[in-house]
Image: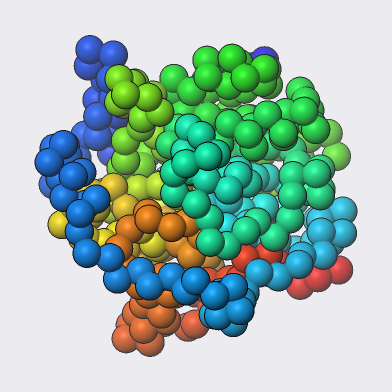
Amino acid sequence: MAEATPSVLDNTNERVQPIFKDGRYSNPWLESWKEKKFSERIKFLFAKSYAKVPHSERELDETLPILRPDLSVFASSSETGVRHLWVGHATSLVQFDGLTLLTDPMFSDRKSPSQAIGPKRYRKPPCSIAELPTVDCVLISHNHYDHLDYNSVLALNKRFGDNLRWYVPMGVKKWMTDCGVQNVVECTWWQEHSHTRSTDGDFKFVCTPAQHWSKRTLTDDNKTLWCSWCVKGPNHSFFFTGDTGYCPAFKTIGSHYGPFTLATIPIGAYKPRAVLYGVHTDPEDGLEIHKDVKAETSVGIHWGTFHNVSKEFYLEPREKVKELLEQQGMPSTAFITTKHGEIVLIGGKNK
């Protein structure tokens, strides 16, 4: 398969590269990043939780309902706008200009090496992989279990095979090919890849920075890269933030590739803040990313799906976003949250 090629602007001072030393990656921003000590990870485990996720399915259905989506609308793109369906956590089904994408597909019950133990979903996916419309491309932000799910990768590959193209950050391609996935484009930050569709025009995929880390085993910390993704179509554009703390890169992304019709931005899994500020954005940081990348509309993701990912009240991300928009005098449509399974059309009208 065609490999990604570096952008001609790779050497500009603005386009900072990840640090790669002794086979491991690190974030380059001294002002926003500090390597986490093992003691801080232990501190998170024993911190008091205010999540208060209801045990009652009835209460969950009232406060955080799961809609049954009409996936037939994805049979063809809207003439204008970007169609979005939130599957849950960081997984979205996105369609525009004749292209259909999945982000960080996670359809399993647990984010763990084993489906017998580990943090479990309290909100199920609104649809199965078998029910999905035809998907053209998948964007992977990094290799954590809640973003790169083994069972979901196998199921998608079984269904779509080499017709499905996977975009992954550096170091992840080998894991994908070991799973039997062949149509993989691996990129480092600021690399661009042209995706050609004979009937709808060309799309530009750009691997862009995020501030995070990677790990799947006891000894592979940061041996693979993490990233965000820009997708520029003939008429519309999409930014997938992935999993990240706030950092200066988002202003650079907005300067070079914005504005975006739609951005999906993480707003959950941020408390205790002293431990998680560098790796997960809270609603305030998410709103800053929205402004930095010049998104016309953003959808809040990475919340309301899994147990034991952080300690804030389970509905706080949604409530905080609304408060911030009001405080800053921004329209409620600028940054939205959706129900699991809810389909919205951003920046256009239905046919």
5 to the left or right of 256: right
Q: Quadrant of the N terminus?
A: top right
Residue 18 appears in view:
yes
Image position, residue 181 (x, y; %): 66, 21
Residue depicted at 69% across the width and 60% down the height: 126
Whole-percent x and y of residue 279? 28, 47
Snapshot colouring: rainbow
Please state which of residues 270 and 122 is positioned toward the viewer in this rendering: 122
Name the residue at 22% across, 12% down: 22
Left or right placement of residue 289 versus residue 65 in this view: left
Picture mark count: 0
Q: Is residue 211 left or right of residue 84?
A: left
User: What residue sits 61% from the left and 53% below the top?
Assistant: 92
Q: Is residue 182 positioned above or below 322 on the image?
A: above
Q: In the rendered image, is residue 295 in sight?
A: no
Closer to the camera, 93 or 202?
93
Instruction: Give how far across and how far down residue 52 sits, in percent.
Output: 38, 72
Image quarter of the C terminus: bottom right
Residue at (61% x, 79% y) in the render: 58
* 4 is higher (above) or lower (below) than 130: above
